[in-house]
Amino acid sequence: MKIANRIENLPPYLFVTISKKIAEKRARGEEVISFGIGDPDMPTPSRIIDTLCQAAREPANHRYPESEGLPELRQAIARWYQQRFDVVLDPETEVLPLIGSKEGIGHMAWCMLNPGDVALVPDPAYPVYAISTALADAEPYYIPLTATSGFLPDFEAIPGDVIKRAKLLWLNYPNNPTGAVADIAFFEKAVAFARANDIVICHDGPYTETAYEGYRPPSFLQAHGAKEVGIEFHSLSKSYNMTGWRIGMAVGNAVMIDALKRFKSNMDSGVPQAIQLAAIEALNGPRSEISRHNDIYQRRRDLIVETLLDMGLEVDTPKASLYVWAKVPKGYTSAGLATELLEQVGVVVTPGNGYGVQGEGYVRLSLTISDASLVKGLSKLATWKGMMGRSKSKS
């Protein structure tokens, strides 16, 4: 049997490989502490769970939902954007609920790219941007993100022949994996670049609510003219600890929203209505839950950064996101350090090269780990520090 080339050539998703290694060690009875996947360890707020339980008992919510989502949810999303960012959205044409933002991100290439077109993809970045581009028979062109530029793309460095073929630009701030942030001035620059070159922008913004010390990340849509050239993906996953519920949204340019809506109507049956009703409860509720969670993440961030600096790793303290991006010690590769930490002390970190060529030389640590596991994991990392001089992998 011969499967399609697009699947034959598809690399395994980064975290599938990591999860397999963890499972193998645990099957041997070994303890593993994971700083790998950014999956909030804290529970969904009880008010949201109560709404879901009540909605699940209503027979009307047992039937097929509509692909475009409940009007009440689209209105709640628009209201949340106006309250949080002062961005005005039309719930009918500029808002689309998603089965998690990953669904929309993965499908957007099919909506906007023809075979042979180019998508401008940051490097390092969330792998789905490039993979979805390739699955749509288009070509990713990687824009380097480096520490010297604050992990922001340099649009002027993109070759002219690439720009002529480019149809879509991916942005993501606060950034995964680097934790970098962008201001409205940068988004204004991106909008001008897109308008001048007939390129649409997809901004992935699920971490705007995960920020520290009073910092309030902006939305891409706050930039003047942003809705004319692009959309923003957002999610309840990180803000309300709802990763397993699979509920997110795309908002912005009406033409792009309509294209994604038409794709969805042919490919899925929408978000279950009980989950939509729980999402409405989440969006309409107080921000105090988010602030409380961020206080916990900030404390974890500070402990991780302190430990990494003590180990001799170079690391900046992130202002937002759920990740710490650390430069590996001299003589190590990303995979080499990640492998050694797993094998020697049972600690999982994500190798930076899994996010692109420019991620080589870094590892990513997630803040979504219980306090007890965090303390144990940091203790293990301190133990590894003592082994550094005796055993160094350069693989």
Image (cartoon, helix red, strand yellow):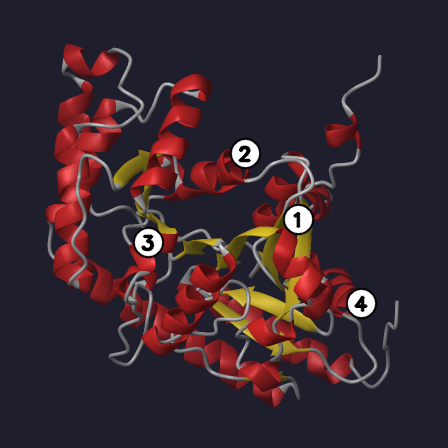
How many angstroms separate mark 4 from mark 2 (CA)? Answer: 36 Å
Q: Secondary structure at mark 2?
A: helix
Which amino acid type corresponds to the residue marked 2 in the rendered image? Trp
Which amino acid type corresponds to the residue marked 1 in the rendered image? Leu
The first of marks 1 and 3 along the sequence is 1
How many angstroms separate mark 1 from mark 2 (CA)? Answer: 22 Å
In the image, 324: left or right of 188?
A: right
Residue 51's x, y, as percent?
Answer: 14, 33
Could you tell me which residue is drawn at 58 percent across and 87 percent down?
309
Above or below for 234 versus 68: below
**Contact, mark 1 vs mark 2 (Cβ under 8 Å):** no
Which amino acid type corresponds to the residue marked 3 in the rendered image? Glu
Residue 40's x, y, as percent?
Answer: 40, 53
Which mark is in front, 1 or 4?
Answer: 1
- Which residue corresponds to mark 1? 14
- Which residue corresponds to mark 4? 336
In the image, 295: left or right of 3?
A: left
Point out which mark residue 228 bears. 3
Above or below for 217 versus 249: below
Which mark is in front, 4 or 3?
Answer: 3
- Which residue corresponds to mark 2? 110
Which mark is in front, 4 or 2?
Answer: 2
The first of marks 1 and 2 along the sequence is 1
